[in-house]
Image (cartoon, grey):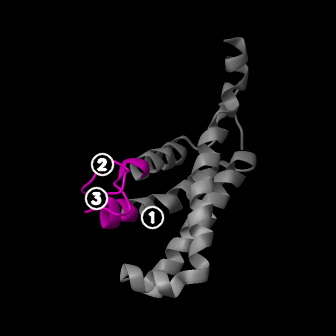
């Protein structure tokens, strides 16, 4: 238990890395195909560009926030929340399971809700407190 207590202040990195890896992958992957995604989703190119920027910048800020400033963590998470809400309500709503189905070929909201909960945790919690001092 002592070992777990010693490493517990660093456990936030598991959430940060999981969240950032997903959004960096999806954000950076959108840039080469903005027009195709725009047509496929029936959205203006500028909206798809804003989503890609929010995903990429949000992910980078969540990682940098762990090393640098609390506001970076919170702004990064805040940038990702509307993206995730959009994905939940526009694409995945109506099916809980992440498994693809006839009605939901991209799967349901299970994974997206998990990501949203991580975003909200980081938005609310910010950086960790260690020995009474904020790790900024």
Q: Nearer the viewer, residue 83 or 69?
A: 83
Q: Which mark is residue 83?
A: 1
Task: Give the magenta range.
Answer: 86-111
| Residue 136 position (above or below residue 90) | above
Q: Is residue 99 magenta?
A: yes
Q: Is residue 67 left or right of residue 94?
A: right
Q: Which mark is residue 96?
A: 2
| Residue bearing mark 3 | 93
User: Farthest residue toward the top?
Assistant: 1
| Label 3 Cα crowd, 10 Å radius (few <14 / some 14-19 / many 20+) | some
Q: CA distance from mark 1 to mark 3?
A: 14 Å
Residue contact between numbered discs 2 and 3, judged by CB atoms under 8 Å: no
Q: Which mark is residue 50?
A: none
- Where residue 99 sits: x, y (%)? 37, 51
At a point 43% along the width and 49% down the height, the residue shown is 111
Per the image, label 1 sits on a secondary structure element best described as: helix
């Amino acid at each position: 238990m002592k070992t777990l207590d010693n490493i517990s202040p660093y456990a936030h990195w598991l959430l940060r890395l999981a969240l950032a890896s997903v959004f960096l992958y999806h954000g950076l992957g959108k840039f080469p195909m903005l027009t195709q995604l725009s047509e496929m989703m029936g959205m203006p190119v500028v909206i798809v560009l804003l989503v890609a920027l929010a995903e990429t910048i949000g992910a980078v800020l969540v990682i940098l926030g762990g090393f640098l400033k609390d506001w970076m963590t919170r702004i990064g998470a805040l940038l990702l929340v509307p993206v995730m809400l959009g994905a939940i309500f526009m694409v995945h709503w109506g099916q809980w399971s992440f498994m693809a189905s006839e009605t939901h070929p991209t799967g349901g909201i299970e994974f997206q809700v998990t990501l949203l909960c991580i975003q909200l945790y980081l938005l609310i919690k910010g950086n960790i407190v260690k020995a009474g001092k904020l790790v900024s």
